[in-house]
Amino acid sequence: MLLKSAKIILLFVFLSCNNSSNSYAKNAAVSTNEKPPHYNTIEQIPLPAGYTRTPAETGSFAAWLRKTSLKTDNTVYLFDGRKKENQSAQFAVLDISVSKKDLQQCADAVMRLRAEYLFSQKEFDKILFIDNEGKQYLFKEPCTRVNFDAYLDRVFGRCGSASLAKQLKPTMMNAILPGDVLIRGGFPGHAVIVMDVATNVKGNRIYQLAQSYMPAQDIHLLNNPTNQQISPWYLVNGEERIVTPEYLFTILELKKW
């Protein structure tokens, strides 16, 4: 009976967003005292030799993500202004609001970026998220910034990785594109968003990932803990596991809008 209980506890820990079983990924986090160069936007981050960014139509989600501004301060702060304990996970910090509430965590950051894009394009009728019970949260007039922020707070309080994983559609790693999401639905699970993708003449693909975490914190572009030579890029290499600084995904957990 004790052995069975221990197995249940270990399974719960593995599925947690604050996942201690992902110690491999945490221990592999990039640690350096060197101050990285500053880039103003995602698209300014250099590519490894031989790679070219995948085409993105003007006004597309991919194009918008690449234009995302980066902070000059590379420190990740929590929602309450404290510094995050682990400062080795990030390559850069996105200049996106985290608000003053402990709401914008992992899946919430993904929803924030998607909603911000649609809001910027004035595609208000497409700003829609669905909770785990199937209830829909559609953004409604007035289409003001104040109402938009209040809407997102409601969404973040009712939707999460479990519901977002249901809302998104499966896709394949060899077709990965900016805006796709690596997500494990759970209570909590975890989610990271693909910020950029590039290819070379051999058809190899590389990509960047961004996340928030628990507690709510600045959205940040992740280092690659297993291949520092191309960090912050990750290579689609056919391996089943995708090791990020604070979480371990599988290739079967990639989804698209």
Image: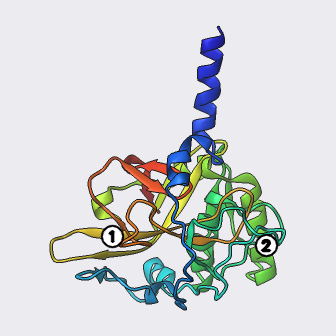
In contact (CB < 8 Å): disc 2 and disc 1 = no
Left of 254 or right of it: where is 27? right
Residue at left offset 59%, top offset 67% = 88
Disc assigned to residue 99: 2
How many other residues sit within 10 Å of disc 1, few (<14), some (14-19) or many (≥20)? many
Q: Secondary structure at mark 2?
A: loop
Residue at left offset 40%, top offset 68% = 228
Of the two numbered discs 2 and 1 on the same chain, state the one appearing first in sequence.
Answer: 2
Disc assigned to residue 14: none
Looking at the figure, which quarter contains the N terminus? top right
How many other residues sit within 10 Å of disc 2, few (<14), some (14-19) or many (≥20)? some
Answer above or below: position of 15 versus 140: above
User: On the image, numbered disc 1 is attached to which residue?
Assistant: 206
Residue type at mark 2 is Ser
Judged from this view, the residue extending furthest toward the left is 202
Q: CA distance from mark 2 to mark 1?
A: 31 Å
Answer above or below: position of 188 versus 137: above
Residue type at mark 1 is Ile
Q: Secondary structure at mark 1?
A: strand
Answer above or below: position of 67 versus 5: below
Count of all numbered marks drawn on residues in the image: 2
Judged from this view, the residue extending furthest toward the top is 1
Nearer to us in this view, 22 or 116? 22
Nearer to us in this view, 18 or 173? 18
Residue 105: quadrant of the picture: bottom right
